[in-house]
Amino acid sequence: MRKHYLIILLGLLINSCATLPSLKIPQSFNPNDSEGVIIGAIAFKNEKPIFHGYSFYYTGNGITKINENNMVRIVPESTVKMKFKPDFFDGDKAVYYFSIQEPEGQYAFSNFKIFDQGIYVSSTKNIPMDIKFNIEKGKVKYLGEIYVDYNQSLIKLNNEKERDIKKMNEQFPNLKID
C-alpha cells in the first residue's frame, strides 16, 4: 500500500512542476537553415495564477488545425500552492521566453486556451486571439511581448525589444536575433 502512495505522490509532483518554454529556445541557429525562428516573451500580470495551464496556439503556412505541435504552453508551479515560475519578473509581470521554428511564411497566434484542474472536474476555455507574425528563412526575429491580464480580459502585443534582446543575448550568446 505504501508503494501505491509513493507512486501517486511522485506522479503528482511530476505533473505539478512548472514548465519553461525557454528551454526549447535553440542555443544557436544556422542562417543557411531552410526554416526560420521567431522569438518572444509571454508575460502575465504577476498575481496568483488561477488556471493550471495556459496554451497559445498558432496557425499559418499550412498549419490549420490546433494541436500540440503548434503551441507554446505555460504551466505554473502547483506543488504546494500555485505560483508563476517564469524566466524572470519585470515589475508586476511574470515573463516567459519562447521560440517557434517553422518554414518561412505568415503565421498568427489564433487561440489562447486556459485549463483548470479541480479535484473532481477539469475545464478548458478557448479564447480567440489574432497576433500575426512572419517567419523568414534563415533568420531569428523578435516578435515582442504577449501580455496577458486575464482579470481584465486583456491580451496585447507590447514592444519590449530593448529589455528582451539584452537579456536574450546574455542567455543565448550564440543566437543572432534580428
Image (spheres, rainbow, N blue to C red):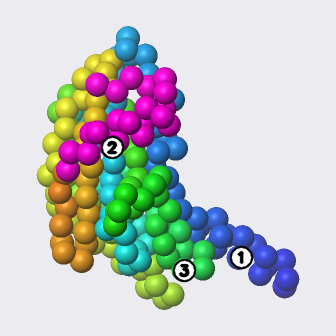
Which one is closest to the eye, mark 2 or mark 1? 2
Residue 148 drawn at (x, y percent):
26, 63
**In this view, which residue lies farthest toward the right?**
2
Disc 1 marks which residue? Answer: 9
Q: Residue at x 60, y 75 (%)?
A: 79
Near-viewer residue (25 or 169): 169
Q: Which residues are the magenta region?
A: 158-178
Near-viewer residue (27 or 75): 27
Q: Secondary structure at mark 1?
A: helix
Mark carried by residue 163: 2
Q: Is residue 25 above or below residue 149?
A: above
Packing grade of label 2 (10 A; few <14, some 14-19, many >=20) is few
Quarter of the image for the C terminus: give it. top left
Amino acid at circle 3: Lys
Q: Is residue 116 visible?
A: no
Mark carried by residue 81: 3
Amino acid at circle 2: Arg
Amino acid at circle 1: Leu
Q: Residue at x 23, y 34 (%)?
A: 62
Label 2 to label 1: alpha-carbon separation = 40 Å
Earlier-in-chain disc, 2 versus 1: 1
Q: Is residue 129 visible?
A: yes
